[in-house]
Structures are given as C-alpha cells and as structure tokens.
Image (cartoon, rainbow, N blue to C red):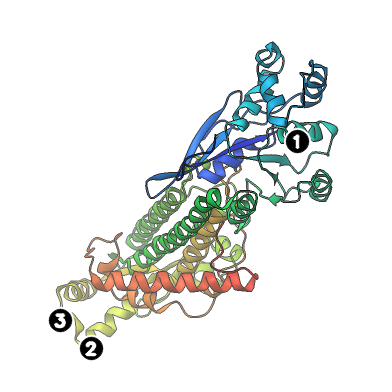
Amino acid sequence: MPEPAGAPLKLAVVGHTNTGKTSLLRTLTRDPGFGKVADEPGTTRHVEGTRLMLHGEPVLELFDTPGLEDGIALRDYLEQLPRPAGRLDGPARIARFLDTPEARGRFEQEARVLAKLLACDAALYVIDARDPVLSKHRDELALLADCGRPILPVINFVHSDNRRTPEWRAALSRLGLHAQVEFDTVAPALDGERQLYTRLGMLLDQDRNAGLERLVQDLETQRMERRRAALRLVAELLIDAAALKVPGQADEAAMQAAAQALQSRVRQREQACVLALLSLYNFRASDYAAGDLPLTGNRWGMDLFNPQALRDMGIQVGKGAAAGAMAGAAVDVMLAGLSLGTGMLVGAAAGGLWQGGERWGKRLLGRLRGRQELSVGDDVLRLLAVRQCLLADALERRGHAARDPVTLQGTGADSLRRGPLPSPLRDARGQPHWSACGDDYQPGSAREQAIGLLAQALLEERDTALRGQGVDKNVQP
C-alpha cells in the first residue's frame, strides 16, 4: 500500500552479518549508544528502529535488521518450493516464503530481514569493503531484489588498507546496481551523508524524495551551527586563559606556588572545554583515559606546560619555557609556559590608569607591596588554540561508530602556530576580569564581543584550511 502524503520514509538497513549495519545507523543518527556493535558476527538478532526528526516531525524511519547468513541455501529452498499456477512476481515469491515453516525455523534471520524490507520504501545494503566478493553476496542481493524495493549499496570501511572497493563497484554494476555510495562509518567524508541521501533520492519518486531533500538541508544547517558553537567554545577557553592573572609574593617559593595554581586552573579549564566539545558532537567522555587531560596515551597526553608538547605541535618554545628560568620582574618573561605580568602594571601606573578603576588600583597596590602576577605565555595559548581546533575538526569528521580514541593530526591551524596572536587575545591580556578562571571575574559586553571576534577568526582560519585541501567550506558530512 502506498504511504500517505507526509508519512516518513521507511528505510531498511540490510546486509551480510558483521558488515557495519548498526555502525551506519549510529553515525547517521549521531547516537553512539544505538544498538550493539561488536567484532563477532550476528550481534543484531532482531529488528531495531529509530527516527530522524525535522522540526518535530519524523522524516525518516531507519530499521536495523539482523545479518543475512545463508542466502545461498535460501535461494535453493525457494527454487524447490512448489510452483503455483501462473507466474509470481518477486514480492509474491517472498511473501509465499514467509508463510512457510522454514521462515520461522532454519531461515528465521533471513525472514525477518525480508519481511521488514517488504514493509519499507527502500533499503541500504551495507558492504564491508574488506570482504571479497563472493557468491553468497550475489544471492543475498537477488533475494533482496525480489522484494521489489529500491536498493542502494553502501560500501563501508573504505579507508581500510585491505579494502576491495574497485572489486565491489564492478560486481555491483554487473548486477545492475549502478547507484552506489562509499560511506565509512568510522570516518565519513565531509559530504558523505549528503552523498548517501542524494543517491538514495535518485532511486525514489519525487514525493518520497522531498523529505530527504529537506533532511539534507537541515543537516547542513545543524552542522554549520555545531561548527560555530565549537569554535566559540574554543574562543571562550582562549579568552579565559589569556586574561587569567594569578598573584604571588616576589620570592621563589611563592612564585612557584602561584605557577602551580595557574597551571592547575588552565588545565581544568581546558578539560572543561574538551568535555563541552565532546558533548556538542554527542561523544562520550568515557572514550578517553583518565588523567590531567582526557587524551592521555598519545600526543595529546603531553602536559599543557611541557615544552615537548609545544614542539610536537610545531610551536616555537620561548627561552624561558625551554630553560625553566625566571628573568627580571620588570618585563613579561617566560617561566615553564608562564608570563610575569608586571611590565603591564608598571606601564599602567605610568599612565595613571590605576586611578580610573578599582581593579587597577588593587593590582598596582599589590605590585608596590612586592607582589607579582603570573599569566599564561603566548606559546601555551598557541598550544591551547591548536589542539582544541584540531579536536573540533576531528570530532566533526568522526563517525559515531568509531571505537578507537580520537587521534589528532598535527597539521592545520597553521596561522595559530606562528605570527601575532589575534587581537582579541592581546586585548584580553589587559583585562583580568574577563577570565572566568580568575578571582575577579566580571562578565560583560566587551568580553562577549572579544569572544565573538575570536570565534569568527577561528572560523575563517578553518575555512581557509578547507579551501587549501580543495574542500568546499559549506560541504557537510
């Protein structure tokens, strides 16, 4: 029976056992908890469903089905069934099979798949690109074709070293399945989701395709909003870190204690940013090992204030950070990734700025009493910016079927590694009340404006990097 106008498109996700059907659904729904994913075959034993919503209305219903296990034997069985008078079309042959005892016994798994496909508008046939093309796959496709529904082959795991993608493409074309799509559920292409739904729409009539077109447009809008939100989270972190000042007495022990306090605050603030990014992209904090930073065990595990972490990210290390020595207190100097902010105070006093506000007066008074201020050094700010931007980019490209920890490529964000810091960060240096990590935090419109400008600069940096890779900045996964 045809679906009523406006009814959601029903899509069965089918294929051989252990090809990544549940993984595909996790990535399409951005739900890492959907179903069960494991390396052993036959993990999904019954049909599970989910919906994709658009403005509160269901636009697509997706059904995860059990793996096809014995297509060869089932085709042989169908050939042995008594033939009724007259010819039966494919769906009628499948319906006749579903009424047999074997559909509730030996071929129960296959029967569940075929029954669900008969109740759907189309199917995604998921293929593991690492598998050789075998006769069992051809028999499975013949059985699915008998259901009389459009079938779009989805070639999974196309980034694997032992992939057989050309063999699969040729075999599918020989079977008349010329509309195909490559979609790696672990690391989908930036435009992978759009390609999948566009190819599927080519197999459907115009009325059924209209919902897919609206879904694709909405997914692209959401993706842009997530990208902007992610870079705003990074901008807020950087403003907080740049503006942070931690006071201490001008003796070595007190300054070391102040340095430890500042480092702890910045580490915790970066940790909060990491968790916020994971939540934004609907990933779990449990994906990462415990520690001062969540990504221990790889190059992210380097402590934020370790000079080697800076070098690994291609950031030039200041002399103070490299040597760990304290220079004079009259100018900004580096100490294990920290900067003494007294030079700014002396300039403020000379200009009489402290008389215009209580904050400057308190800071100058502290300076006259022998107190110093520590701030985060430029190289550490660069490290924060680079690896948070790389994390946001990695999460944007990561499929929700991925089970390995996030890995960051040490490329991209080149302008953040060198050259002058963006002007909002330089402005934040003189505004310690902008830092949510500080003791005198006072949010206001000036801070919000600086965050907005910095987020826009980070977005432009990312778009420039994408254009350098030959990718349309508006292309969405």
| In the foreground, 227 or 60 | 60
Secondary structure of the residue carrying numbered label 2: helix
Q: Bin the neighbour count of mark 2 within 10 Å (Cα to Cα): few under 14, some 14-19, many 20 and up.
A: few
Q: Bin the neighbour count of mark 3 within 10 Å (Cα to Cα): few under 14, some 14-19, many 20 and up.
A: few
Q: Provide the residue designation for mark 1.
A: 141
Residue at 38% in and 50% down: 55
Instruction: Give how far apart the Cα atoms at labels 2 and 3 are.
Output: 10 Å
Secondary structure of the residue carrying numbered label 1: helix
Residue at 48% in and 55% down: 214
| In the foreground, 146 or 43 | 146
Kindly tell me whether residue 336 is visible in this rendering.
no
- Check the image and report above or below for 324 versus 89: below
- Check the image and report above or below for 97 versus 243: above
Picture mark count: 3
- The x and y percentages for residue 177 are 76, 46
Residue type pointed to by label 2: Gly
Residue at 67% in and 25% down: 42
Q: Image quadrant for the N terminus?
A: top right
Report the mark closest to the observer, 2 or 3: 3
- The x and y percentages for residue 134 are 84, 35
Q: Provide the residue designation for mark 2.
A: 351
Cβ–Cβ below 8 Å for labels 2 and 3? no
Q: Which mark is residue 356?
A: 3
Report the mark closest to the observer, 1 or 2: 1
Q: Image quadrant for the C terminus?
A: bottom right
Of pointers 2 and 3, the one earlier in the residue sequence: 2
Residue type pointed to by label 3: Gly
In the picture, measured across the screen, residue 344 lies left or right of residue 314, that is: left
